[in-house]
Amino acid sequence: MESDQRAAAPTRRAGSGQPRRADAERNTAAILAAAAGCFARDPQASMTEIASAAGVGRVTLYAHFPSREALLGELMDRALREVAAAVAAQHLDRSPADRALRTLLRSSWHLLDRNLRMLHAARRALPSETVEERHTDVLAAVEQLITRGQDEGAFRTDLPAHWLVTSVYTLILAAGDQVESGRFSSAEALSALEATVDSALRPA
Amino acid sequence: MESDQRAAAPTRRAGSGQPRRADAERNTAAILAAAAGCFARDPQASMTEIASAAGVGRVTLYAHFPSREALLGELMDRALREVAAAVAAQHLDRSPADRALRTLLRSSWHLLDRNLRMLHAARRALPSETVEERHTDVLAAVEQLITRGQDEGAFRTDLPAHWLVTSVYTLILAAGDQVESGRFSSAEALSALEATVDSALRPA
DNA sequence: TCGAACTTGAACAGTGCTGTTCGAGTTCGA
DNA sequence: TCGAACTCGAACAGCACTGTTCAAGTTCGA
């Protein structure tokens, strides 16, 4: 689609690749920030709430994002692109798989803080296929890593890679939830997560 | 206003313990069954949809359940009571903890089939505290089991019991999702689940 | 400075629910 | 069989939100 150039387009210079005015750019940013906050507080947040949180008129909000769904989608895209970038920056293919996975856990852990509540919001508001779809890239990278680890003998091979990926992913989210509910500090959760993932993936 | 006495009550003989007429009883059952189906298909299902799926007027639906939330709550209660009953019936305290956990996994696995989609629906429609609240009983039973296992030396003690409970619970749901999305057959998922839980809980 | 880009509130149209009331019909059960 | 329990459709009132239009105003940037 055009989500690469502008899933989030302003009023007039919408479709074309023309440069946007500075205030429009600023508003787009303010809206995205406010929306992230609102959705984190209340997954059902309305466009009116978001607009006023962004210090912007409701009409302006619609000028930037044609629908609630588009806004939430763009928000999720950004978060996942951020994760994907972080993953890519780690050069996970340059170290042994088990070491690389550990690195991956730690780096994604910090991004999670900001994005966990938003992910829950997206799960509520968006059709579940959409949510899964936007995860495919990142999860594919993890699967590749795990498959390599299986080849290297670092990870168990009695279970399919896709299940190991799911396990890791689901445990990360669970650990995040524990922090959110106050049963774990962030540091405790991370170390519990690492220990659990480690023993879940290690060969018997 | 009178919602206190009739959380899930039929029209007239609401609060009192009086026996209800047979047709009222039948309708309640039909509604619950239909609602489970509807919510499974579409978590956003409206009261109108549910009523007609149950072969009942919308007014009648409201006579049995004063609100959408009450209906969903009752549905979830029943599911979790079912699980709790199954757990209790297994007499998990009579066998070694690791063996008991395995039994627990298998028995809850079958109940999951029916209830997984409904749980997802509840998570979307109900405030998350409500959902967690209704889980406490069952999860407490599991935690007790795991704690005993730690005392017996069957489970690792380097991680707190509550985290192990969370891990198990979250892995069960993940396995259910894998079946739903077609990446696993039910049997494959169960055996992967068992293997993963096993190695996640075993002492190092 | 001047026009185009952008923002704004008010107001509107439309939708799709929720929950209630009513008067009348149907079914149970003693 | 008879009254109470229960059901029914229609219709109503109300709400909250979505997305659009308009006729202003304001702000950027060349």
Image: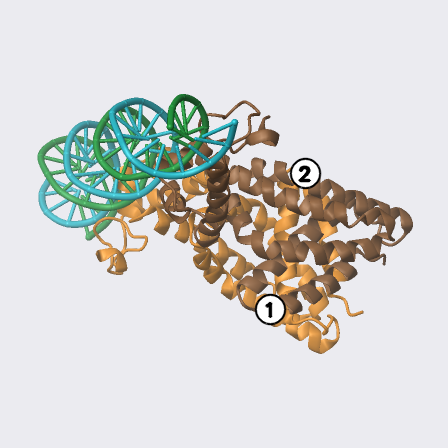
Chain colours: A brown, B orange, C green, D cyan
Taking the view exactly as shown, the residue that stands out farthest to the right is A152
Mark 2 → mark 1, Cα distance in angstroms: 29 Å
Identify the subunit bearing mark 1.
Answer: A
Q: Identity of the amino acid at label 1?
A: Phe
Residue at screen point 58% across, 64% down? A179
Q: Nearer the viewer, residue B170 or A151?
A: A151
Q: Nearer the viewer, residue B103 or B18?
A: B103
Share a chain, discs 2 and 1?
Answer: yes
Coordinates of residue C5 in the picture (x, y in percent): 45, 28
Q: Is residue B153 above or below residue A173?
A: below
Q: Identity of the amino acid at label 2?
A: Thr
Secondary structure beneath label 2: helix
The first of marks 2 and 1 along the sequence is: 2
The residue to which callout 1 is attached is: A184
Taking the view exactly as shown, the residue that stands out farthest to the bottom is B151
Q: Nearer the viewer, residue A85 or A174?
A: A85
Q: Quadrant of the C terminus of chain B?
A: bottom right
Coordinates of residue D24 in the picture (x, y in percent): 26, 30
Q: Quadrant of residue B34?
A: top left
Coordinates of residue A139 in the picture (x, y in percent): 70, 43
Residue B87 can be seen, yes or no: no
The residue to which callout 2 is attached is: A136
Q: Residues within 10 Å of mark 2 (few under 14, many from 20)?
A: few
Residue at screen point 58% across, 45% down? B113
